[in-house]
Amino acid sequence: MNRYVLISFCLLVSMVINAQDCNGFNSLCNKRYDEVVYLTTHNAFNYGPDFNAPNQNFPVAQQLSDGVRALMLDIYEQNGEVVMYHGVSFLGQQPLDTALMQIKSFLDTHPSEIVTIIFESYASVTLVEAVFQSTQLMPYLHTQAQGQAWPTLQNMIDSGKRLVVMTDDNDNLSPTWYHYVWNYAVETHFSNHSYADFDCSFNRGVASNSLFILNHFVTDPNFGLGIADSAVIVNEYNKLYSRAQSCQTVTGKLPNFLTVDFYDLGYCQAVTCALNGENCSTVPTELSVEDEIPRVFPNPASNNLSITAQSGIGKAILYNSLGQKVEEYSVASNTVISIDKLSDGMYLLILSEEKGHIYQQKIIIQH
């Protein structure tokens, strides 16, 4: 091959590589890790139907595919194994390697994506490190010296160190990649029982830390469980975006980890995109005067539910009082769905309209 042709070819390849997207957008490549917003799932492992009282509707693999880039995982030791569960194991549990293998698969097949894990840990670092070794994630692990500037996303991609791991376990013997989260981040309060409880005051961590965790989820006041109907409300575009912007103004800190329950309800990905300064096609439009709010009747209902709307409804999902998805239906403008096999009780019906609007209604089933 001619020398000059070879040089031109190499330059072209270099330009193509350098033009790749970083976490989905080329404009993020030259931003430092702490200058980017990451959609973050609270109790990411705790999904229905494999877990009772879930915080999410889909497993880690689906979350990553849908744009989630940071995962909060609770881990415990059990008979020499590291497992994930929320509070009590009888509500459901999985080995840690289940989630880590899904993360490994995603990183292998998405070479320009950066992922973060934030552990609430009740397991020894020795056991945790062994799981990272067995799932072959060690080559991906980034080490960040405390007090040093974070690398850009492009730097992380070029180095191959695209997995950041943080933990609330302050173990002085931890390996360098196992970062004590409160040396690097500050958070808002995580115990909120309604939208009115949200504010921008700091909880754990110190204000000078470069990373900011914005906890934006509502939990049951008695048991600390996720609530799907509350997620629909607080994940609504204007509520989530306005709070994130307000807290950035008040604190002077970018909300790096936008932490939510039921990330698929509402507009979490669209808000993340907008906070990163991108023009996102998923940002919802306002309701126009000709739009009609869907009608769902009768209520209470026994055998069937009728759904009518002026514009088409894409799907309807029923959740029980524990936040578990029990049924999903494809729905047109006028549809009757059967509920005769469902147990009596209170349910939440989520309707996703074709134009991007989401509606919710509590339904009582009473045979």
Image (cartoon, grey):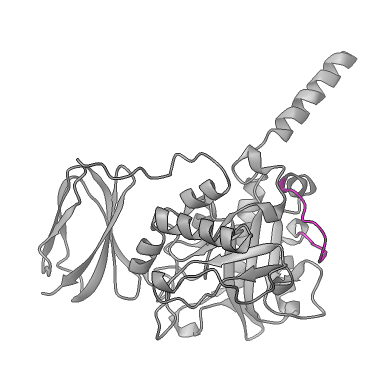
Relative to 284, does residue 239 appear above or below in the rendering? below
The answer to whether 181 appears left or right of 246 in the picture is right
| Outermost residue, front side | 250
**What segment carries the magenta color?**
142-153
**Is residue 146 magenta-colored?**
yes
Indicate whether 111 appears above or below 94: above
Residue ID at (61%, 64%)? 251
Q: Quadrant of the N terminus?
A: top right
Instruction: From the top left corner, tell me how far across and down residue 45 is, in percent.
Output: 52, 69
Dominant SS type (magenta):
loop
Give the number of callouts. 0
Q: Position of residue 20 (x, y in %)?
A: 67, 36
323 vs 311: above or below: below
Can residue 1 be seen here? The reply is no
Q: Is residue 229 left or right of residue 262?
A: left
* Residue at 77 percent of width and 57 percent of height: 139
Residue 74 seen in render: yes
Check the image and name the residue furthest to the right. Answer: 3
Instruction: Determine whether, in the image, residue 7 is placed left or right of residue 318.
Output: right
* Quadrant occupied by the C terminus: bottom left
For the residue pair 140 and 219, the one nearer the viewer reads as 219
- Check if residue 80 falls in the magenta segment: no
Question: Which is more toward the observer, 302 or 92?
Answer: 302
Q: Position of residue 7 (x, y in %)?
A: 85, 20
Residue 339 on image: x %, y %: 17, 65
Q: Is residue 257 above or below residue 43?
A: above
| Residue closer to the observer: 261 or 290 | 290
